[in-house]
Image (spheres, grey):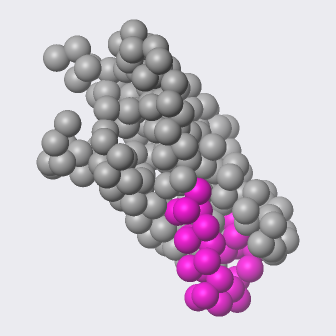
């Protein structure tokens, strides 16, 4: 697979879709700490971006250490990607629909430990992206992870800022948007694997 427009577009859209959970949590962090300093805002966004980049790489490494022994497994990768992204995207859609009008968020400042837990929790679904980028070489996988991290960083920074100004009432809508993107990407990977 060459590094072309489709590569960048898919990586950026994966970043947008995967960052929606982190965006919702960033909104909550901004709401709970309206006087948060810019340094902490950047730290939160950077932490979430780090985990969103790390998880796909872990998935990629797992695929390349297991699949080399089971080459027939590669034919199932589009199915697995569709299933995982469909499940995650569907779950995000359902959660977003259930909470789209909910403005009840916990009122506490998150410390470093809490932020790390948030970072892991919001990025665990990105582990499945290792399946979707399995055909990438290592440099391509690193570039895709860097694009996902950059997109996540900016989305989370915006999320914290909006949370400080507006609140978390739009968090459910972010999950709906992110879920729809993940479903679209799962279908795109599945369909392009056949044509």
Quarter that holds the N terminus: top left
Residue 22: x %, y % from top left: 59, 57
Residue 2 seen from this side: yes
Q: Please identify the quarter of the rendering in which residue 30 is found.
A: bottom right
- Residue 4 drawn in magenta: no
- Residue occupying image coordinates x 16% and y 17%: 195
Q: 10 left or right of 177?
A: left
Residue stretch in magenta = 28-51
Residue 130, given in percent of the width and then of the height, sits at: 47, 37
Q: Is residue 168 above or below residue 77?
A: below
Left or right of 163? Residue 185 is left
Q: Residue at x 45, y 61 (%)?
A: 149
Query: In the rendering, at what x and y percent does residue 73 appear?
Result: 43, 13
Q: Residue at x 39, y 14 (%)?
A: 71
Q: Quadrant of residue 184?
A: top left
Answer left or right for 54 relative to 36: left
Residue under the image location 38 percent in, 33 percent down = 134
From the viewer's side, name the closer residue of 151 and 168.
Answer: 151
Which is more toward the observer, 79 or 1?
1
Name the one closer to the observer, 20 or 146. Answer: 146
Q: Position of residue 157 (x, y in %)?
A: 52, 73
- In the displayed structure, 166 sits above or below 137; it is below
């Amino acid at each position: 697979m060459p590094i072309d427009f489709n590569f960048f577009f898919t990586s950026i859209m994966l970043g947008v879709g995967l960052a929606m959970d982190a965006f919702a949590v960033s909104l909550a962090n901004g709401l709970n700490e309206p006087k948060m300093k810019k340094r902490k805002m950047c730290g939160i966004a950077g932490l979430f971006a780090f985990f969103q980049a790390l998880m796909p790489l872990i998935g990629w490494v797992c695929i390349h250490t297991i699949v080399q022994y089971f080459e027939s497994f590669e034919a199932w990768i589009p199915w697995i990607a569709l299933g995982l992204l469909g499940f995650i995207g569907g779950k995000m859609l359902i959660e977003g629909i259930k909470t789209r009008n909910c403005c009840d968020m916990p009122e506490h400042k998150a410390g470093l430990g809490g932020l790390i837990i948030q970072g892991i929790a919001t990025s665990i679904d990105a582990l499945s992206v290792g399946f979707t980028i399995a055909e990438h070489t290592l440099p391509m996988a690193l570039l895709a992870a860097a694009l996902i991290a950059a997109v996540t960083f900016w989305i989370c920074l915006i999320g914290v800022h909006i949370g400080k100004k507006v609140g978390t009432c739009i968090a459910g809508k972010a999950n709906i948007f992110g879920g729809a993107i993940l479903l679209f990407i799962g279908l795109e990977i599945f369909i392009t694997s056949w044509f």
